Image: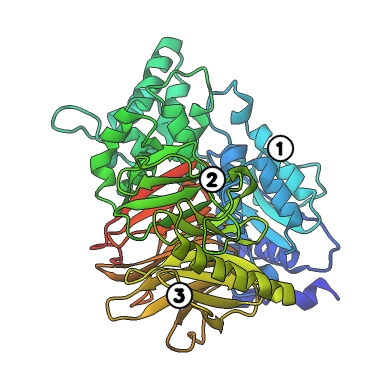
Amino acid sequence: MTVGAVTPDIASWPPLDEEKRAFGQRLLDWAANDTGVGPQLFLVRGAEGSGKSHLLAWFLAGAAGHPRTTVHATVLAAGLTAETFAWSLGRQLGYGPLSPARLLDRASQDERPLLILVPDLHRAGAGPADLPSAALETLVAELLEPLLALPHLRAAVEIGTSGLLAGHGAEVVDLGEGGDNGSGNGQASYAELVAAVPRTADGRHDWSRAPDTVLRRVLDAALRADDSDAQGVAVRGLLADPGFLVHGSAAALTAVLTDERIPVPGRLREVWRRAAPELTAFHTDSAERAALLHAAAVGTDPDLTEYLRPLAHQHWWSAVWARRALHVSALALVPGVERGLLASDPTGRLRTYDVGSGAALGGTASPSVGASDGAAAPSVHPTLVRPRSVAPRDARSALLLDRSDALLPLVTEDDPTAAFALERIAEHHGSAALTGEESLVTALASGGTRSPYAVVGDRGGTVHVWSLGEYQDVPRSCRVHEQPVTAVTCVDTADGLTLTFSAGADGTVRLWETSAEPMPVPVQQRRYRTTALAAADTSAGPVLAVAWSDGELHLWHVSTGRVRVLPWLRGCDALALTSEGLLVIGDPEGLHAVRLRLDVLWER
């Protein structure tokens, strides 16, 4: 097969200046060549104003309409370090923001033939000049060159007049001299840039009204100051100004805060490190940036938290409390306990918290797990149980899904009624699993306001709903998925319906109203795995929260089908949602609560 036979007709692409058509055709020929023969790298050279970026933008505009030229990621490299470049590329490839090492590992396992565009590589690099992580060469050596060593990845890269990546057997086009050499571009002094920032009535810098050019360049200009004392004062002044933290370049701030030699106020370095992967994801709404930074500061830096709170509360979500260093693997609201939240960590410890404040309501539970004949079950040491899901019956008893895939009843007091009901559920699914692997339990959750329910999902794609309030010999069951169930939840609605939501290993989320047949099509479908579900009947109607393995957190308005994406700071392992719109998130860094403004949540 020849290259010409697979190349889309350039006439079907967006218009291109006549003098650049030959360059465009070469780029198109290179991208469409899927024979595996030819260079993996296409370099676009040229001086300022020669049209390099325009050529890549032209290609990107037409590429989506042709399967052979699909671009999987476009990373604008100007001002990026290896770390911030990796975050951007990871997000676009669907991995989420990853470190360079983890990104390389994920990309090496990706089965897709990947095509990426990298405009402005020659403008990459940020932060103190003597810091290795700030150098453009570090990005090339630690990230781009290893990526180009992957046989299934190709890249078109803009390099200006530099010799970057010259030794990689690339195809090169040189657009030559431009009409504007850009002399002095980006070299304004710190004083000149700061002078362009409007002032508030009391004389403070109003970064919300600063020109974009200033926001992008002022921190680098402060680092370039000739006088070291003046440089230090300028940099420290910017880092101590919460307004600049909200509005300034997130990539530049990330690069500067990497330098441990630079003093910072409070615990800013720790807070910024927590928020930076999401802050660098092109969030232009100042209230959203404030909400993200505020969420990272809650429980860590009280002064920064209080300063950001008013602006963060203007957004449709904002953090309420955080219990850091508390890795939570399972969450559930406790029926019959006002504001009670049951949490389990990976070691098996169960604790109850006040959902509104995060305050502990009780110590570690000492579960009684096992079979009994109407009496309290024999005590089993908690370290032998590793719950990955919990379904509380009340404050004293619950059903657990252990990491061994076994359902286990937990009864903390002598309660024969609770033990009998919970053991029936565990016995039913344990016996079923012995008869066929498809009946092995893979998901568990609780729900319901009129009466508590346990929802069980199995490897065969079936969802089972049990009453936890009274003994039930068999559940209501329905096969909802073609693949194993990975997460479940349940909610009662004001009009008397019981809605169950379940996620399958195929990336689908489905709805089943238990008195009818499941919906024929998924309510959501993505190519990622669902890590947690939670639902509640709120003042805005039923709401479903869905956490995905790529780090996205979706809020689905059941009545209208509208979806909002909550840009949380990390991937979620567990979720709980109250009827008042308080979303509790368990992730590798702790337990966090976020207030959703239900009155504006679905507005655009």
First reached walking from the N terminus: tag 1 or tag 2: 1
Q: Quadrant of the N terminus?
A: bottom right
CA separation in Å, label 2 and label 3: 25 Å
Disc 1 vs disc 2: which is toward the camera? 2
- Are discs 2 and 3 less than 8 Å apart at CB? no
Disc 3 marks a residue whose amino acid type is: Thr
Q: Secondary structure at mark 3?
A: strand
Determine which residue is flagged by label 3: 500
Image x and y of residue 262, in percent: 47, 19
Residue drawn at (51%, 43%) of the image: 277
Residue drawn at (41%, 46%) of the image: 352
Callout 3 crowding tier (Cα within 10 Å): few <14, some 14–19, many ≥20 = many
Image x and y of residue 67, in percent: 67, 74
Q: Quadrant of the C terminus?
A: bottom left
Residue drawn at (64%, 55%) of the image: 403
Image x and y of residue 531, in percent: 55, 59
Reply above or below: 99 against 42. Answer: above
The label on residue 142 is 1
Q: Does residue 83 appear anywhere in the picture?
A: yes
The label on residue 345 is 2
Say whether residue 597 is left or right of residue 332. Answer: left
Disc 1 vs disc 3: which is toward the camera? 3
First reached walking from the N terminus: tag 2 or tag 3: 2
Say whether residue 4 is left or right of residue 362. Answer: right
Callout 1 crowding tier (Cα within 10 Å): few <14, some 14–19, many ≥20 = some
Disc 2 marks a residue whose amino acid type is: Asp
- Are discs 1 and 3 less than 8 Å apart at CB? no
